[in-house]
Amino acid sequence: MRPATAEKAQENNSGRCKKGRLKRGKDYDLRMKVGRWNVRTMLQVGKMAEIANELLKYDLDITALQEIRWKGYGRIEKPRYTLLYSGAEKQGEKGLGFIIKRSLENSIIGFEPIDSRLCKVRIKGIFF
């Protein structure tokens, strides 16, 4: 049975996701905002900056991007975010990636591009 709203889902978790305790005894907010977006293409000039600004406006920490349509795989580092991507052998087809806030950059354990439809990113964190 699914909760009707996000508030109900949070109540059902008994607040476990709200705060955590680290070694020094201080309270830290451990929540991470995750999203996904089918961007249709990132081949246009300025499209990466446009998408990143939109995601930063909504304060998303990590966002999966679909159909970026770039060739190959790699990592692009910008002042406010890092883009990890995996594309097809031919430009203009398929491809996906992750835009990750710069504040989480030290939490990235690894990135593995598998093919133009699948890749994985490992992030260090505390799970309940």
Image (tube, rainbow, N blue to C red):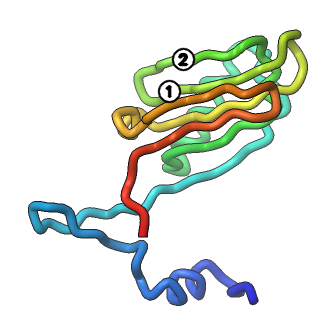
Q: Is residue 53 left or right of residue 18?
A: right
Give x and y (percent) for residue 110. 49, 31
Give x and y (percent) for residue 85. 66, 24
Q: In this view, does 58 lie to the left or right of 48?
A: left
Residue occupying image coordinates x 42% and y 63%:
127
Residue occupying image coordinates x 85% and y 32%:
40
Name the image quarter holding the N terminus: bottom right
Q: What element carries label 2?
A: strand
Disc 1 + disc 2, Cβ < 8 Å? yes
- Snapshot quadrant of residue 42: top right
Q: Name the residue under label 2.
A: 76
Residue occupying image coordinates x 34% and y 34%:
106
Of the pair 99 and 1, the residue shown nearer to us: 1
Task: Pick out the residue farthest to the left.
Answer: 24
Give x and y (percent) for residue 12. 54, 88
Q: What residue type is labelled 2?
A: Ile
Q: Is residue 52 left or right of residue 20?
A: right
Q: What residue type is labelled 1?
A: Thr
Q: Mark 1 points at which residue?
A: 82
Q: Residues within 10 Å of mark 2 (few under 14, many from 20)?
A: few
Q: What element carries label 1?
A: strand
> In the rendered view, would you say 107 is above or below 43?
below
Q: Which mark is first along the chain, 2 or 1? A: 2
